[in-house]
Amino acid sequence: MRSSPRSATIKGVAEYAGVSIATVSRALTNPSLLHADTLAKVDAAIEQLGYRPNQIARDLRRSETRLVMVIVPRLSPYFLEIFRGVETAADKVGYGVLVGHTDRDRKRETEFISQVRSRRADGLILAASTDPDAIVASNSQAPPIVLAIDGGASKGLPSVVIDHVAAAQAATEHLLDLGHRHVGLIMGAAGSGIAADRRLGYERALGAKGRTVDPVLCVQGDFSVESGEQAMEMLLKGPTRPTAVFAANDEMAIGAMRTLKRHGLRIPDDMSVSSVDGQRIAALSDPPLTTVSVPAYDIGYRAMMTLYDIMQGQPITQRKVLKTELIVRGSTAKPKR
Amino acid sequence: MRSSPRSATIKGVAEYAGVSIATVSRALTNPSLLHADTLAKVDAAIEQLGYRPNQIARDLRRSETRLVMVIVPRLSPYFLEIFRGVETAADKVGYGVLVGHTDRDRKRETEFISQVRSRRADGLILAASTDPDAIVASNSQAPPIVLAIDGGASKGLPSVVIDHVAAAQAATEHLLDLGHRHVGLIMGAAGSGIAADRRLGYERALGAKGRTVDPVLCVQGDFSVESGEQAMEMLLKGPTRPTAVFAANDEMAIGAMRTLKRHGLRIPDDMSVSSVDGQRIAALSDPPLTTVSVPAYDIGYRAMMTLYDIMQGQPITQRKVLKTELIVRGSTAKPKR
DNA sequence: TTGTACGCGTTATCAT
DNA sequence: ATGATAACGCGTACAA
């Protein structure tokens, strides 16, 4: 009693059960069409042979994979949250999820899109893409695509995003409203659209209060904890020491706070810190971080659902903007004296 | 000048270029076989028609997908780290990665394995599976599988793991060596093999010093920050208050420290805390956490490489145990007085 | 209710 | 160096 040398096919099952392959196929996809006795015979044969339909052949025939691809710049906890949303939604509608990261490399992004055009997956979710329009334009016929988190300047592509400008503005205005007059900025990665938007939000907040932007108070970061640490070092060494700082994401804010502690400075007494993202770590830090929360999970979830609608040929809303919310915690307070 | 209604196939390219489909196929897979002029004609046609080979048809013919599936209990930063390793290795050898999570649900695990048997992917990496042997046994013919992080009691399946018992023992012995006499334990999720191993490590550490395990000092957690918070509450309320606690992972240790701070207790002065995992957050916490680091990324990377070897039909080592390392930081010290 | 036969888009074998 | 053609495993007209 040994198993067959190579895996059973629909043909083998048909022979074993003494029916045609069409009957076996029907037993799989539409059992109600079959006579009960026939169905039983077929099921028994399937069981006996350990038969599993070949997904590849099925995909070819149906010309769909029921797979979607999601592309993120990097595999960080932040993008994981988006991914969780995508995966949950995909699972719900019977899709599998293929993940790839680009390291902000345009070539890699193009490569992934090309794979989808090759029918490796039925659709694509592009999170925080550098320049989606260019990418898509470089592929003559684009597959179903949804942009997530960042819609870029793209008019054509459907997207599920937040208003990064408004979010950053809220985080900065909170500091201004507390009475801070010198508010520093730690910027996100150069070349990132999100970083540019959040910088703009910072500038608008100042502008709305009739303040001008002081270039010495704006220092470059790259969204990493380490860059936040270094940026704060710069700020502390600089000619004008701010009493508050807005960091373009939680991780840099955490880094900034680490530097402050290392210098024996107290938060928020000596310096207030606010940011955007509202990742889990923001609530866990000491002190807990004042931040503008971004519904990353929801963004992923809705991006997937939008992609699903597109693949189903349904009409969709071009751009969905989700709400953000300022969460005031312990890292911000009025300036001392 | 409008593009073709449906995407071009190899046949269309052949007609357009005035050659046979075999020639087009060769232009794709082995261009050196072709006369330069012919190749140029074909390439031009491909370019003109925006042709992309259909991956599904190719997969069917070659009967492989060049996809692997990786299954994790949950999509947490910890498993993300393993996944990063898998993805990097997979990318290097030309494979794509399909992700799924089980929520520790055996049915879902079986379902994923079944999908791989259906040739949705060529192989499978199972991270921290509850009971891999049973799962595999329930599928008559198992696909290529590698276990990651936790090898369970499995003898048959290849795995890339760490020694969870030894890791927990090291973290606990560190506390004992500092002179703590009452060391608490915060356990991982019930039913988890890793949790069981780490508990055993704690017990062995005590045993090695001739101590007995005090049940009052052992409280149940589930690997989450929240469970760590609650566990520490229990410990503080209990009949014997420990001067040190070993938590079965970083997140619970973080939770425990939060509770301590909330009660105005100082770390490590009033209570030392150690754990296992060495996630990024352990270095970022305040105080930084003493922990036994687990090379999660490497585990993922090597699991993928092992899977690759198996799929290539190469002989492989059945079990690879990677090294862990005690990292002493600010959360542990000698007991006060 | 069941069977026959074709096609999905490739790759590979065998000719020429 | 190139072409004709048979698989790969499945779903589905169309027939019976």
Image (tube, coloured by chain):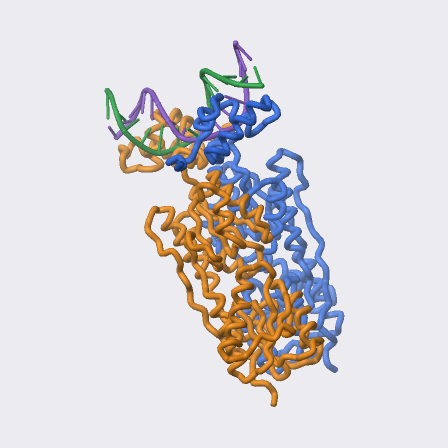
Chain colours: A orange, B blue, C purple, D green
The foreground one among A266 and B77 is A266
Give the x, y percent position of residue B157: 60, 43
Foreground residue among A310 and B50: B50
- Left or right: A112, with A42 as reference point: right
Can residue A51 be seen here?
A: no
Name the residue rendered at 50%, 32% in the picture.
Answer: B46
Q: Position of residue C11 (x, y in %)?
A: 53, 27
Please indicate whether residue A255 sits to the left or right of residue B18 in the image.
right
Return the residue nearer the eye: A171 or A92.
A171
> Quick one: quadrant of the C terminus of chain A?
bottom right
Residue B180 image position (x, y, % from top left): 72, 74
Residue A33 can be seen, yes or no: yes
Q: Residue A28's quadrant in the figure?
A: top left
Place of residue B86 in the rendered image (x, y in percent of width and height, measured from the top left):
60, 48
* Rendered view: B257 above or below A224: below
Task: Answer with left or right where residue B113 lies relative to residue B291.
Answer: left
Count of numbered badges drawn on the protein: 0
